[in-house]
Image (cartoon, helix red, strand yellow):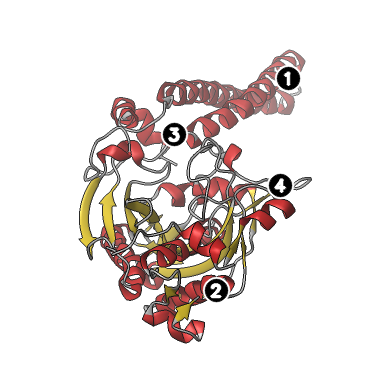
């Protein structure tokens, strides 16, 4: 979250920043609630000071064997007033925290201004879009035709937007995330295998709550949620910790299944693997010193791109505009993979720098050798979305006879160079 003092002292600046984002955000309520909180605290402090002063007088009166009953009665009234004010303070502080948690991060100055994804700025491309001398099929037709993907049976046992992988389809999915994990760990990331359920504090810490609760899968009769991304459990590993600055940066990579309600996306990408309620993903998470976070964002993005480069799949990198920026992010690069059946690029990774926004919510700090403390900067990105990578391989490596070539780097994992 944003620093309360900064918001109050720079309310107009924060309002202007919120005006560049999609959605509406109430900065004034934060200022108003903070003013009420300060007024109550000031009154309580004055009453406590008065009580302390009079208590000293009572002590003197009693020492001199004088009557102090009238003063004691008045002080009892003061005590009741302090208790009343303390009771009023609790709800105001709770409302203030919720209001502050509901304001997104301020976009970095380097983020292009815009209303939505139509204003995103292309940064670079890798390879040219795949061309065929036949009409390419969409990945769901390829997958269902060869018995690799079975959404029909998944629909029977669960519902829409779920898929069963069969045979070489299941092996391909497994090969992809093993390849991703091997690549990232070879590049210096520590592998984590976290729980697939997290508590409310964890979801709040990374910014999924309170704003996106309707999109989360809550576990009945508990305060747990199924993870929407490994970002949540992995980033929260350091929640409440003070890390020696000498140990930064810390790089983690993790595979998890991810679960999302996809609220508000009815009618979008209803076929295939692009928009599922359950999907696999390999995540990259970084903790670093504030002065290094922008360089870490560039390297994080490059490390996610490396997967597609090794696979040999065309993609591009775009910088998200302020109107398309995620809630907690200060700046995001999207990596978009070429999908022949769509005739366009489709997001396969978002790489974001949250600066101190998440760390402030989770109270993750660093401490230097000199004893200086501050909030770390957090970053994360998909490295990559596995199901979408499967879809991209099926489409970009398809042959006219309906078979699919296996990318060279995956052959050791697959045990074959062709899927047919």
Residue underneath mark 3? 103
Q: Secondary structure at mark 1?
A: helix
At x 37%, y 60%, the residue is 136
The answer to whether any part of residue 186 appears in the image is: no
Q: Earlier in the sequence, mark 4 or mark 2?
A: 2
Residue 304 placement (x, y as % from top left): 36, 66
* Residue hosting label 4: 223
Residue picked out by circle 2: 174
Q: Position of residue 100 (x, y in %)?
A: 48, 34
Residue at numbered disc 1 = 76
Q: CA distance from mark 3 to mark 1?
A: 41 Å
Instruction: Name the residue: 62% across, 69% down.
Output: 166
Q: Residues within 10 Å of mark 3 (few under 14, many from 20)?
A: many
Q: Nearer the viewer, residue 6 or 384?
A: 384
User: Is 84 placed left or right of 301 in the picture?
Assistant: right
Separation of residues labelled 2 and 3 (CA atoms): 38 Å
Is 77 positioned to the left or the right of 109 in the image?
A: right
Q: Nearer the viewer, residue 318 or 352?
A: 318
Is 208 located above or below residue 250 in the figure?
A: above
Q: Quadrant of the N terminus?
A: top left
Q: Residues within 10 Å of mark 4 (few under 14, many from 20)?
A: few
């Amino acid at each position: 979250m944003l620093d309360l003092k900064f918001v109050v002292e720079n309310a107009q600046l924060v309002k202007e920043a919120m005006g560049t984002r999609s959605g509406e955000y109430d900065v004034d309520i934060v200022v108003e609630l903070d003013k009420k909180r300060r007024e109550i605290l000031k009154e309580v402090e004055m009453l406590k000071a008065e009580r302390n002063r009079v208590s000293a007088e009572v002590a003197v009166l009693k020492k001199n064997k004088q009557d102090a009953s009238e003063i004691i009665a008045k002080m009892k009234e003061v005590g009741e007033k302090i208790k009343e004010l303390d009771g009023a303070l609790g709800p105001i502080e709770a409302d203030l925290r919720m209001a502050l948690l509901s304001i997104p991060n301020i976009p970095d100055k380097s983020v292009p201004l815009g209303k939505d994804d139509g204003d995103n700025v292309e940064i670079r491309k890798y390879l040219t879009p795949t061309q065929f001398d036949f009409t390419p099929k969409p990945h769901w037709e390829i997958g269902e035709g060869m018995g690799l993907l079975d959404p029909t049976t998944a629909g029977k046992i669960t519902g829409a937007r779920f898929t069963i992988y069969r045979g070489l389809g299941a092996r391909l999915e497994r090969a992809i995330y093993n390849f991703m994990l091997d690549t990232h760990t070879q590049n210096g990331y520590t592998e984590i295998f976290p729980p697939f359920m997290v508590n409310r504090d964890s979801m709040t810490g990374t910014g999924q709550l309170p704003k996106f609760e309707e999109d989360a899968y809550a576990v009945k009769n508990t305060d747990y949620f199924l993870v929407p991304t490994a970002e949540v459990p992995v980033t929260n590993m350091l929640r409440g910790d003070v890390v020696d600055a000498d140990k930064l940066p810390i790089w983690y990579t993790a595979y998890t299944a991810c679960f999302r309600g996809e609220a508000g996306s009815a009618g979008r990408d209803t076929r295939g693997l692009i928009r599922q309620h359950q999907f696999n993903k390999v995540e990259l998470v970084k903790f670093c010193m504030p002065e290094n976070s922008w360089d870490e964002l560039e390297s994080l993005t490059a490390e996610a791109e490396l997967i597609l480069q090794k696979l040999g799949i065309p993609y591009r990198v775009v910088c998200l505009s302020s109107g398309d920026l995620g809630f907690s992010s200060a700046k995001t690069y999207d990596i978009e993979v070429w999908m022949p059946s769509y005739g366009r690029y489709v997001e396969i990774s978002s790489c974001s720098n949250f600066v101190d926004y998440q760390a402030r919510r989770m109270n993750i700090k660093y401490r230097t050798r000199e004893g200086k403390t501050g909030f770390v900067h957090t970053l994360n990105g998909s490295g990559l979305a596995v199901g979408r990578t499967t879809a991209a391989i099926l489409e970009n490596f398809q042959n006219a006879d309906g078979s699919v070539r296996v990318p060279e780097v995956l052959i050791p994992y697959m045990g074959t160079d062709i899927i047919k």
